[in-house]
Amino acid sequence: MKLLFLDESGDHNLSVIDPQYPVFVLGGIIVDEIEYNNTIEPAINEFKMKLFGTKDIILHTSDISRNRLGFEQLKSAEFRTVFYAELNKLMCDLNYKVVACVIKKQEHIDNYGFRAIDPYLLSLNVLIERFIFELSNNDKGVIISEARGGKLDNELELAWLDVKIQGTKFIKSTRIKNSIENFAIRRKADNIIGLQLADLVISPIARKSIGKSVKNDYLVIEQKIRKDKFGNINGYGIVTMPK
């Protein structure tokens, strides 16, 4: 069994484009369920206990960067150095694959106008395809997406049902139904380790996609991005749209 944990970065709304952040990114990690239960969860919880004395703190890029909701110690330069060194080492050591879909919102509108598909729904189709391509013949998959709240969660459920019924451009509905056992939506407050890792990997990808300087966190996860046999990530681990 393989698991795909998904999180988003940026605003999916096409009627509002922030010139400082003109992209929407949906992405996350693919992990083997046994590896996740036996290695990844314990390692992240050990990291939390070591640095914060609790497993209940939720690794969230926004809270980390703003030194809030348990991350107030990061105001100390000494603690911040230790935190990022330990986190980057852990992200390097763990076994997972990164996938992400980057939607350049203005170009998406320019290409498709009023026919432009909601960036979240478009990205979801792309990542479902990459996830199924990653499954072996005998593998089954489960997708866990972070809750977006109320109406948006309902739209997500409907989008998943539509994919199961209609399929995608490259995968028939029967294959999707046979490959994906469950699609779950979980809240950030549920403290799901996989969703926290998804959050940690998509922010560096989003920053790079808008031309911001590459930091150590991106250099770490770059090695984890899904690749073809020649080492290419474009179209395999990172899909940028429009192409």
Image (spheres, rainbow, N blue to C red):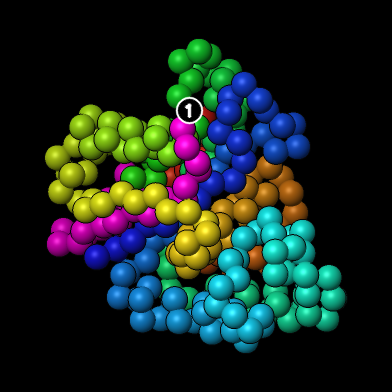
Q: Is residue 34 above or below residue 188?
A: below
Residue lying at 36% horizontally and 76% vertically, measured from the top left: 37
215 left or right of 148 in image: right
Residue 144 in the image: state x and y as whole percent: 38, 54
157 left or right of 212 in image: left
Residue lying at 62% horizontally and 25% vertically, measured from the top left: 106
Residue 9 in the image: state x and y as whole percent: 59, 46
Q: Amino acid at mark 1?
A: Asp
**Which of the image's four quarters has the N terminus?**
bottom left
Seen from this angle, which residue lies furthest top? 114
Q: Is residue 243 visible?
A: no
Q: Quadrant of residue 42?
A: bottom left
* Residue count near mark 1 (Cα–Cα under 10 Å), binned few <14, some 14–19, many ≥20: some
Q: Is residue 205 magenta?
A: no
Q: Nearer the viewer, residue 93 or 80?
A: 80
Q: Which residues are magenta?
A: 129-151
134 left or right of 122 in image: left
User: Mark 1 = which residue?
Assistant: 118
Residue lying at 83% horizontally and 70% vertically, measured from the top left: 75
Q: Is residue 146 visible?
A: yes
